[in-house]
Amino acid sequence: MRKLFQTMALLLVVFTANFAVAQDYVMSVSSGTMNVGGGGDLSITFDNNGGDVQGWSYGACNDTAMLTCTGAADGSTTATVKNGSPPDFNQISVFDEGFTCGVVICFTGCATLAPGTGYELNVASYSCTAEGSTSVSFCDSLGSPAVATVVVVGGASVAPIQNSGTVDCSVVVLHDWIRGDANGDSTVNIGDGIWIIGELFLGGAASSCAVSRDSNGDGNVDAADAVHIFSYRFLNGPMPSAPFPGCGQVSGQTPEDCEGSGC
């Protein structure tokens, strides 16, 4: 009976130790907002509250109905984890449905990842294909053979706590506008040139469509834009560039541009 109690006590110690070790290592995927038809990056981070880590591997899966994984790169920690240099072994594989990585810091044990928080393991890129909310989660199903999500401590593989990230894919609403229509009355004339001068130099009201003031399309808003409008209207000068003479949009426009446009 005594031997039985000793065995049970030993098993309890082992179980408790393993449980505590598992809680000491936490991998997390960041969250973000992306535009449908566009994309963005998510970071995979690691908190080490246990012992020195010799390496790690994991898979990160996404739902291809809403997201496509387009790439993955070393995070700031991984890039310098071997005493300021990249690890001895570092393999990243990218799939539409996610990516995998496997890292061995140093084959000879010359470096490990010491306890600390906020380590950046990887930065992954995604494109949004549909509107809605979805998750990027750690998984053990990608690759052939499939890559397991573990950290290596003292030569043993330990499954860390795994926190998923959320991605909100939203439809971008871009507002039409007319280049040169600084006062938002849906036409370009002397009034727009006067408006630009008043706003820039006389403390006049701000345009409801700031980007439209760039009548000459040079990326700046200054006196030359007012001169361009006067020249176009009275001296047979060149017309403003697109979107002109009608309403439209331009590359690089943001949803905030021209919410108060006259279009």
Image (cartoon, rainbow, N blue to C red):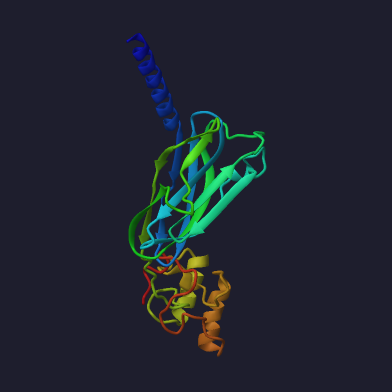
Q: From the top left corner, tell me how far across and down residue 53 is, in percent.
A: 55, 34
Q: Is residue 118 left or right of residue 11?
A: right
Q: Which quadrant of the rendered structure holds the C terminus?
A: bottom left
Q: Where is residue 76, by image quadrant?
A: top right
Q: From the top left corner, tell me how far across and down residue 101 is, in percent.
A: 53, 49
**Image height check: is 52 above or below 210?**
above
Q: Is any part of residue 117 visible from this angle? A: no
Q: Is residue 32 left or right of residue 91?
A: left
Q: Which quadrant of the rendered structure holds the N terminus?
A: top left
User: Please, which residue is most extreme toward the bottom here?
Assistant: 236
In this rendered view, identify the residue nearer to me: 59 or 247. Answer: 59
Count of numbered labels shown in the rendering: 0
Residue found 42% across the figure and 51% down from its top: 141
Q: Is any part of residue 145 visible from this angle? A: yes
**Image height check: is 156 above or below 11?**
below
**Image height check: is 46 above or below 140?**
above
Residue found 34% across the figure and 63% down from its top: 131
In this rendered view, identify the residue nearer to me: 186 or 89. Answer: 89
Q: From the top left corner, tell me how far across and down residue 258 is, in percent.
A: 40, 69
**Image height check: is 67 above or below 158?**
below
In this rendered view, identify the residue nearer to me: 240 or 233. Answer: 240
Q: From the top left corner, tell me how far across and down residue 143 is, in percent.
A: 48, 54
